[in-house]
Amino acid sequence: MIPEKTIEDLISKHSLLEKDLSSGELEKKLFAEKSKEYSDVNEIIDNAKKYISYAEDKKELEKILQDISGDEELKSMAEQELTELQSEYEINEKKLKLFLLPKDEADKKNAIIEIRAGTGGLEASLFASDLFKMYEKVSHKKKWTLELISISRSDAGGLKEVIASIKGTNIYSTLKYESGVHRVQRVPDTETQGRVHTSAATVAVLPEAEEVDLKINDSDLRIDVFRAGGPGGQSVNTTDSAVRITHIPTGLSVSQQDEKSQHKNKAKGMKILRARLYELERTRIDQERSHDRKAKIGTGDRSERIRTYNFPQGRVTDHRINLTLHRLEEFLEGEAFDEMIESLTLRAQEDSLSNLK
């Protein structure tokens, strides 16, 4: 049960925001901030008011049911209303609990996605390419902007590694459960005996950090420049345009050589480094907060096997929530992607609610 004072404070906050916004005295920036806050609270205000009035409404209906001389038809209606009231109360309580859950400040951020071929050699690189194409299709359907940061191709047209930034609305909250090991089971084109091979690719989704989110001291960075190298060791550029940035305190290092400009390579490298350092700090804080809680889905552990794509059976299975969709081709086309994400989000919310004290 949610403390009554918590709900009353929410209703009071809604009234105060309404008063502030109609005063006409707020500066433009503050007005925008309070408008957003009001919009969020406004979505839940009816549930809050009904939740508060539940006890009084229940008492009135029970009084009718306990009246010995009362009309039987009226009692029957009151009994039905009481059942509906209890059901509505449970729905309102769940919605309010979800609203009151601590918000992840990164959910509304853009994201950086990193995909790397894992075990399985050439087949793993082809699968990494399939995953990247899937995220490209999802981005296109959702009208997100996907920008390539760096890419390393394999001999067979697959991908050894690809890093991209994705911009739009609530990107990180949508993609954060994609982090982990994705496993594929299929018969490679080169397999003459028809045997199913298993290979894997790792996906890391990081919230894109702004400079205000994380301060990086120049003195903590070591920047090395070198000549970019292509496949087989040949030189891509004749100038030292490739950049390696090392964050000395953590040892994290990022190399960037896709651009001909040293300046552009450094900017791209800093974007990746900032995202990785931001995620490192978020993980540290989260571990401090939740060390005594039970394990939840979506830990973001890149070594965690999260999903299997089985081509012979035409299925995709998410192992964290034991959900199997027998629509593999649709999923890779981005068609069934939302169904999986919504199920993962719902389970994460349920886990958070069970931990709510």
Image (cartoon, rainbow, N blue to C red):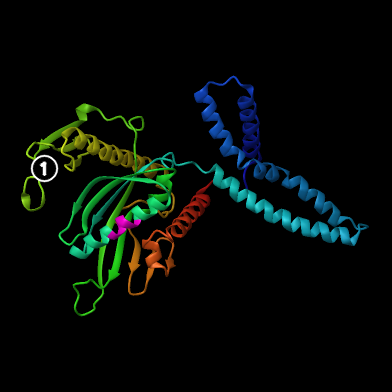
The front one of 135 and 197 is 135
Q: Is residue 193 visible?
A: yes
Callout 1 amino acid: Ala
Residue toward you, 221 or 193:
193
Q: Main secondary structure of the magenta part?
A: helix
The image shows residue 27, relative to residue 164, as above or below, that is: above
Pick the front one: 292 or 186: 186
Could you say which quadrant of the image residue 39 lies in?
top right
Q: Residue furthest bottom?
A: 193
Considering every residue shown, the one lying at the far top of the view is: 25
**x, y (%) of residue 297?**
41, 55
Residue 262: % across, % down: 16, 34
**Mark 1, residue position:** 228
Residue occupying the point 33% across, 71% down = 311
Q: Is residue 177 visible?
A: no
> How far across and how far down the image is residue 18, in percent?
64, 30
Q: Residue at x 8, y 36 (%)?
A: 239
Write down the region rendered in magenta. 130-134
Query: In the figure, is residue 44 to the left or right of 301?
Result: right
Q: Position of residue 350 (x, y in %)?
A: 51, 54
